[in-house]
Image (cartoon, rainbow, N blue to C red):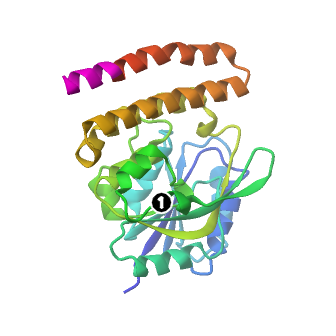
């Protein structure tokens, strides 16, 4: 029997782009069973645009939910709670799906009954408007442990990911205390016990925008360190203590390098040197942990 699919779309002040995302859903060759738009306290005309496009859709197909501004993680959690579908297909309100997305998802659900997570490739549109293919499936080895792969490198993009609703609920959903990378944290949490299947085809477009939380380097840096610490311990039973601590060390270095690079590219030299100054303290923390565990 076909599985019911709910598309969950968080939106915050997206009046200029939410219509593009919704029309990409309505243009699917196989529609999802319902769409839930969670307006995370928008102060612009997001609600009006959603209402206008809802009038173009089957009655009751698009459900609009408003909540006080609490962040993307809270908005997605609300959508998951309100969903009636067995599968949740995530779509950010400033991204879009290509027409075969849901049809391919339905096919993958049948072909991979063992999987609770299904993802696919995407196109990325940069700030300069240029578009390029991101073959995310190339970073996934179905024969290797999912958590260790995802800890080394995040290769799941939110608008590409669909998850069984029960699996999300069982792990507690998105961590609402994280203002950035809460999607990556959920993927790691799911990876501790769930299986992933990949569709090696680009079925979405990720649009980079200057005002997105992704562009907030400081917040991304803070949340990335929290996640690195939190999941290093879960690696120990899989790859051993020493290897897990080495992976953690590499992750800490990567968090600092990315933040320093991004602040430098923005010309924020004070912030760049501030992050650089924190590196010795973080490194010392990792070394103390290593010495303490191996003593």
Q: Which residues are magenta?
A: 287-295
Question: Which residue lies most toward the bottom here?
Answer: 1
In the rendered structure, the answer to whether residue 77 lies left or right of residue 155 reads: left
Query: Please, what is the dominant secondary structure of the magenta stretch?
Result: helix
Q: Is residue 29 above or below residue 292?
A: below
Q: Within the magenta stretch, is there residue 293?
A: yes
Closer to us: 74 or 223: 223
Query: Residue visible at 31% across and 56% down?
Result: 169
x and y percentages locating residue 262 in the rendered image? 65, 29
In the rendered structure, the answer to whether residue 232 lies left or right of residue 261 reads: left
- Figure quadrant of residue 193: bottom left
Query: Residue visible at 36% across and 69% down?
Result: 115
Q: Is residue 99 visible?
A: yes
Closer to us: 23 or 165: 165
Closer to us: 269 or 140: 140
Q: Quadrant of the C terminus?
A: top left
Closer to us: 163 or 278: 278
- Figure quadrant of residue 227: top left
Q: Is residue 204 above or below residue 284?
A: below
Query: Residue visible at 32% across and 38% down?
Result: 244
x and y percentages locating residue 284 in the rendered image? 37, 16
Q: Quadrant of the N terminus?
A: bottom left
Question: Which residue lies most toward the left here?
Answer: 295
State the residue position of label 1.
Answer: 140
| SS class, disc 1 | loop
x and y percentages locating residue 294 in the rendered image? 21, 26
In the rendered structure, the answer to whether residue 10 lies left or right of residue 211 reads: left
Q: Within the magenta stretch, is there residue 149?
A: no
Q: Is residue 73 above or below residue 220?
A: below
x and y percentages locating residue 14 in the rendered image? 66, 48
């Amino acid at each position: 029997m076909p599985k019911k699919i709910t598309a969950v779309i968080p939106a915050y002040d997206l009046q200029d782009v939410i219509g593009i995302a919704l029309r990409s859903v309505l243009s699917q060759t196989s529609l999802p069973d319902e769409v839930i738009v969670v307006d995370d306290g928008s102060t612009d005309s997001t609600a009006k645009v959603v209402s206008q496009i809802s009038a173009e859709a089957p009655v009751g197909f698009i459900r609009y939910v408003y909540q006080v501004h609490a962040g993307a993680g809270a908005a997605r959690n609300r959508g998951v709670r309100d969903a009636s579908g067995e599968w949740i297909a995530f779509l950010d309100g400033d991204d879009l799906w290509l027409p075969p997305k849901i049809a391919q998802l339905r096919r993958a659900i049948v072909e991979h009954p063992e999987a609770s997570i299904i993802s696919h490739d995407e196109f990325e549109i940069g700030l300069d408007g240029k578009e390029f293919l991101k073959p995310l499936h190339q970073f996934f080895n179905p024969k290797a442990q999912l958590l260790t792969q995802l800890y080394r490198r995040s290769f799941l993009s939110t608008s590409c990911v669909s998850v069984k609703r029960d699996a999300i609920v069982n792990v507690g959903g998105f961590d609402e205390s994280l203002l950035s990378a809460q999607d990556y944290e959920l993927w790691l949490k799911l990876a501790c016990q769930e299986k992933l299947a990949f569709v090696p085809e680009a079925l979405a477009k990720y649009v980079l925008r200057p005002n997105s939380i992704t562009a907030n380097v400081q917040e991304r840096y803070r949340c990335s360190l929290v996640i690195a610490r939190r999941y290093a311990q879960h690696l120990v039973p899989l790859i051993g203590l020493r290897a897990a601590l080495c992976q953690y060390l590499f992750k800490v270095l990567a968090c600092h390098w990315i933040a320093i690079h991004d602040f430098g590219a923005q010309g924020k030299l004070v912030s760049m040197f501030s992050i650089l100054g924190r590196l010795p303290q973080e490194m010392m923390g990792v070394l103390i942990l290593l010495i303490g565990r191996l003593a």
